[in-house]
Amino acid sequence: MDQNERSTRALDYAQESVKQILGLSTGVLALTLTFFEDFAGAHSGAARSCIVISWIFFLIAIISGLLTLLAMTSDLWPKKQNKRTKTVDIWTTDLRIYAIIQVVAFGLGSILMLVAGWFALSVPR
């Protein structure tokens, strides 16, 4: 496998990872918004707070995921001619920063969602 093919495959795998986290973030956000009152409507103020904060983290994950995909696109065809190379680099600074923000925000949003579920289930009805 030559360097160009390896770079292309690495970009494809990175793109799929970003898409997976983007889809999961969007799905969790939509599901919890739909069933918010059933899940933590009047159970616990702490559960409500955790859910709202997790929504913020999921929104950050969604936005940074979109920025990551846009950064991948701009890396495929840079604006300046002298930056165009034969191989694609998935380790550019903008791509790494957006991807790290996406993964960290998704992780924090997921943890907060689990904590909210624990608070909601531990409060007596």
Image (cartoon, grey):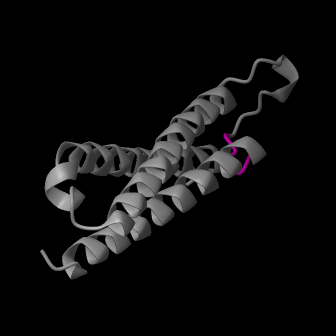
**Would residue 25 appear left or right of 10 to someone viewing this image?**
left
- Quadrant where the image shows the N terminus: bottom right
Residue 64 image offset from top left, x and y in percent: 56, 42
User: Is 43 contained in the magenta span?
Assistant: no
Residue visible at 83% across and 28% down? 83
Q: Which of the pair 3/8 is nearer the observer? A: 8
Residue 109 image offset from top left, x and y in percent: 44, 60
Q: Which of the pair 113/68 is nearer the observer? A: 113
Q: Is residue 54 above or below residue 114?
A: above
**Would residue 61 appear left or right of 99 to someone viewing this image?**
left
Q: Is residue 88 above or below residue 103?
A: above
Kindly tell me whether residue 12 is visible in this rendering. no
Quadrant location of residue 22? Answer: top left
Residue visible at 33% across and 71% down? 114
Residue visible at 67% across and 23% down? 77
Kindly tell me whether residue 120 is visible in this rendering. yes
Marker count (numbered): 0
Magenta-tinted stretch: 88-92
Q: Is residue 124 above or below residue 38?
A: below
Q: Which of the pair 102/111 is nearer the observer? A: 111
**Would residue 56 appear left or right of 40 to someone viewing this image?**
right
- Quadrant where the image shows the C terminus: bottom left
Instruction: Tell me the chief SS of the magenta region.
Output: loop
